[in-house]
Image (tube, grey):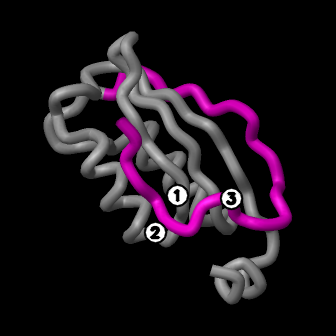
Amino acid sequence: MSTLAKASGALKSVDYEVFGRVQGVCFRMYTEQEAKKLGVVGWVKNTSQGTVTGQVQGPEEKVNAMKSWLSKVGSPSSRIDKTDFSNEKEISKLDFSEFNTRY
């Protein structure tokens, strides 16, 4: 991970919450797959309010790609109404070693 961080410069961290039809449609599984494909770390989980929430960390351009995916793509049978991003900040090191689903 550290070589990845050094090569790309700024590391970003952002929290997210996705609203819409995002539970019962494999949203977390697809989110985890997309994060691993992009090479970002963090987590995803369902909330009791019917949304999906989590955190993404990694090089700025990869975090931005993940933000775009969380806003527009999602899992094949999901419907994303809106995605809120908060606590977006530059970080000096990653807090996670991988991306996983929390329960």
Mark 3 crowdedness (10 Å alpha carbons): few <14, some 14-19, many ≥20: few
Asked whether residue 97 is drawn in magenta, I would say yes
**Residue at 70% in and 82% down:** 2
**Residue at 22% in and 32% down:** 78
Task: Name the residue type under label 3.
Answer: Asp
For the residues labelled 3 and 1, the Cα–Cα distance comes to 19 Å
Q: SS of the residue at dot 3?
A: loop
Q: SS of the residue at dot 1?
A: helix
On screen, residue 84 versus residue 14, left or right, reads left
Observer-nearest of 46 and 72: 46
Quick check: 24 above or below 33?
above
Q: Quadrant of residue 58?
A: bottom right
On screen, residue 23 versus residue 66, left or right, reads left
On screen, residue 33 versus residue 26, left or right, reads right
Task: Name the residue type under label 1.
Answer: Ala
Which stretch appears magenta? 80-103
For the residues labelled 2 and 1, the Cα–Cα distance comes to 8 Å
CB contact under 8 Å: marks 3 and 1: no
Q: Position of residue 51 (x, y in %)?
A: 38, 21
For the residues labelled 3 and 2, the Cα–Cα distance comes to 17 Å
Task: Name the residue type under label 2.
Answer: Leu
Please name which of the two marks, 3 or 1, marks the residue nearer to the observer. Answer: 3
Q: Report the residue marked by disc 2.
A: 38
Q: Position of residue 95 (x, y in %)?
A: 68, 59
Q: Report the residue marked by disc 1.
A: 65
Q: SS of the residue at dot 2?
A: helix
Q: Which mark is residue 95?
A: 3
Please identify the residue farthest to the top as the structure is shown: 49
Mark 2 crowdedness (10 Å alpha carbons): few <14, some 14-19, many ≥20: some
**Residue at 62% in and 37% down:** 15
